[in-house]
Image (spheres, rainbow, N blue to C red):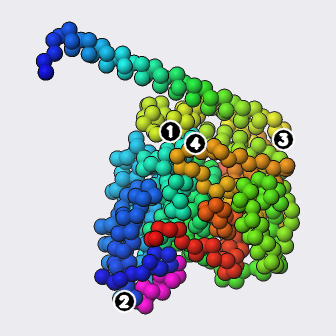
Amino acid sequence: MADLSTDVYYASITELGAKLRAKQFSCVELTRAFCDRFERLGARYNAVALSLREQAVRQARDADSDLKIGRIRSPLHGIPYAAKDLIAVKNVPTAWGARPFAAQVFKEDAQVIGKLNAAGAILIGKTSMVSLAGGGNYRFAAASVTGPGLNPWDRTRWSGGSSSGSAAAVAAGLATFALGSETSGSILTPSAFCGVTGLRPTYGLVSRRGAMALSWTLDKLGPMCRSAEDCALVLHEIAGGDNQDPGSAGQSYYNVRFQRRPDDITIGYAPVDFEEWTQPSARPALRTALEAIRAQGYHLKEVTLPDFPYSDVLATILAGEAGSIFEEFIRSGKVDGLHDAEQIAGLKSYLDLPATDFLRAMRVRSLIQSAMKTLLLGVNVLLTPTRFQTASRASEPLGSGSSSSGSSAGLSSIIPAANLCGLPALSLPCGFADGLPVAISVVGRPFYENQLIGIGSLFQQQTDWHKRRPPVDA
Amino acid sequence: MQLSRRQLAQSLTAISIAGTAGLSAQVPAATQELDRVRASARAAAQRVARVNLPMSTEPATQFKAKI
């Protein structure tokens, strides 16, 4: 077996692909090495839901056979990846992070798994997650059948939710990329906490067929990677129309090499986000990132979100949709098998939601969408800290010991606001505070992922925060 | 060790009482949690209700015979 250096576990998709094509090692050797690492180190971070070693090695053999005859299916050919455990993989358990669903098995692969199979990527395992992607809310990081997601930068800290294991796996070099999902913050938050680059695609760009539904009108699937460029390579393979997903926009994604020049792009931001809402120890890193963006030649314009109760609207819509989706689970009492008392109560309360409240929230949502459209006509993208706090302690109630406030709202509600509008976002590591990763996000117009990737790639050409490694191998 | 029927009955009663005590402690906690979450949802709904809604936001449906 080839002796693979630690660098291989932190290599980008492009770098690994070049080494595979140069026959520095085979797909099988690479897959076995990643499976060993996924199984050996995954438990340290509670990041693994299921190892898929046998089928991964089978896939890798096929990928090697293709390579021998010069057939390269895509840039992902032979690249090991992991998928959040709410994405169905046929004939193996898909537990949705929840004890009551531990034995659940589907007969079909999710659409994204099928697309990545066709692209030659190698699925090495399923990653852990907050139960039911956090539907109902939860008080503790331990709201998962696999225990609290632990952060590779500091195992006393949370890896974020709900795509906890996907972020930890990429950060710790257990997989080259991972799939996550976001209803409101579940890709961006763990990406920021673990120091990986995460892309939340536009609603409808990536088919959700075969993935657990939490909210029909809010759910998105997206990649969590080592760089913006890697996110583009994965998105290229998983995006596309699907007439079996009613939310599908019927659009594809093409990774455009030629981007608009920075001086042709206006970025909206709110100084109050960086100077007041963010915890003091993270402000220097965020200020430096903001100045790096400015120095690249972008036009920066101060903006603020229109005044709406974003979180309340999102919570109400989520309650209505998740209540309907999980109605039988809640009424049957199986919900009591979950780990987190707040989550159990939250899901039960969903069945009490008056239809009038749901309809009102949907009507306000349409106003929010109009207002955001107007805001994004004045600027090309929005720039914010991804989270105002670094990763919280894994053992303490979430949100304890941390409170954010500002003299004005700025863009502080961008996560619920952008999710209500289905807008894409890219989270980029931009430094550290107290030894924990800090990140910025760029949020764009619908289907303008290329613009976000372009901004992210340029930022990552001039910084190396995305290449930093946690003390996994020390 | 052999238990008399009286001892067995006493031990079962003790287990039963202990179990009930644990349960009765859990039930109010769960009820309180549910009440708290419901109150939070009501408060959210009230904040949403403060937004004025023009006709343009009314739900509508259209039947299109032409495919």
The tag earlier along the polypeptide, 4 or 1, is: 1
**Amino acid type of the residue that numbered disc 2 sits on in the rendered structure:** Ile
Same-subunit check for callouts 4 and 2: yes
Give the labeled residue for mark 4.
A397
Q: Residue B54's mark?
A: 3
Q: CA distance from mark 2 to mark 3?
A: 63 Å
Same-subunit check for callouts 2 and 3: no
Disc 2 vs disc 3: which is toward the camera? Answer: 2
Is A2 left, or right, of A120 in this rendering? left
Which residue does the image show at 30% across and 13% down from the upper left?
B13
Give the labeled residue for mark 2.
A69
Which residue does the image show at 78% across and 79% down from the upper left?
A296
Q: Nearer the viewer, residue B48 or A302?
A: A302
Same-subunit check for callouts 3 and 1: no
**Amino acid type of the residue that numbered disc 1 sits on in the rendered structure:** Asp
Q: Which residues are magenta?
A: A12-23
Q: Secondary structure at mark 2?
A: loop
Residue B7 pos. (x, y %): 21, 12
Q: Chain of mark 3?
A: B
Q: Secondary structure at mark 3?
A: loop
Q: Residue A340's mark?
A: 1
Q: CA distance from mark 4 to mark 2?
A: 55 Å
Is B44 left, or right, of A22 in this rendering? right
